[in-house]
Image (tube, rainbow, N blue to C red):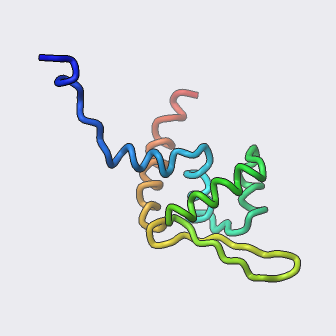
């Protein structure tokens, strides 16, 4: 059997999810919006800490384009923008809870 015939089929679903949520900060952004009720840009930046303004902006735009969050511009001065989860984003919260619980149980052992 040729090597190419032995190749394992790539899981398209996992590959797609990784492409969408593979940004360095995306899962953490979703966590703060969905579980910590953090909805404003400045609040998100303070909670995450090490993220630059441009990185946060980019990750938020990508999450919005992929349908995980909504951006609401209140058209006020000073500017006020809030982010909320879409139905797709809300449906991901149960997955995020499992990831967090797994991490709480397993990662502290490695510290």
Q: In this figure, what is the number of numbered marks? A: 0
Q: Residue furthest left?
A: 1
- Image quarter hosting the N terminus: top left
The correct choice, above or below, for 37 with respect to 94 in the image is below
- Image quarter hosting the C terminus: top right
The correct choice, above or below, for 17 with respect to 106 in the image is below
Q: In the image shown, does 39 or 19 lie closer to the viewer?
A: 19
Q: Residue furthest right?
A: 78
**The quadrant where residue 74 appears:** bottom right
Question: Would you say 18 lies left or right of 2 here?
Answer: right
Q: In the image shown, does 107 or 42 lie closer to the viewer?
A: 42
Residue at image coords 51%, 35%: 107
**The quadrant where residue 35 appears:** bottom right
Q: In the image shown, does 96 or 17 lie closer to the viewer?
A: 17
Residue at image coords 22%, 23%: 4
**The quadrant where residue 14 appears:** top left
């Amino acid at each position: 059997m040729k090597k190419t015939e032995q190749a394992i089929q790539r899981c398209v679903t996992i590959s797609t999810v990784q492409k969408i949520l593979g940004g360095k900060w995306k899962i953490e952004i979703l966590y703060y919006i969905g579980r910590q009720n953090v909805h404003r840009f400045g609040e998100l930046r303070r909670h995450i800490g090490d993220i630059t303004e441009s990185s946060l902006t980019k990750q938020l735009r990508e999450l919005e384009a992929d349908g995980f969050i909504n951006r609401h511009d209140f058209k006020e001065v000073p500017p006020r923008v809030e982010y909320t989860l879409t139905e797709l984003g809300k449906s991901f919260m149960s997955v995020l809870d499992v990831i967090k619980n797994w991490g709480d149980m397993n990662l502290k052992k490695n510290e």
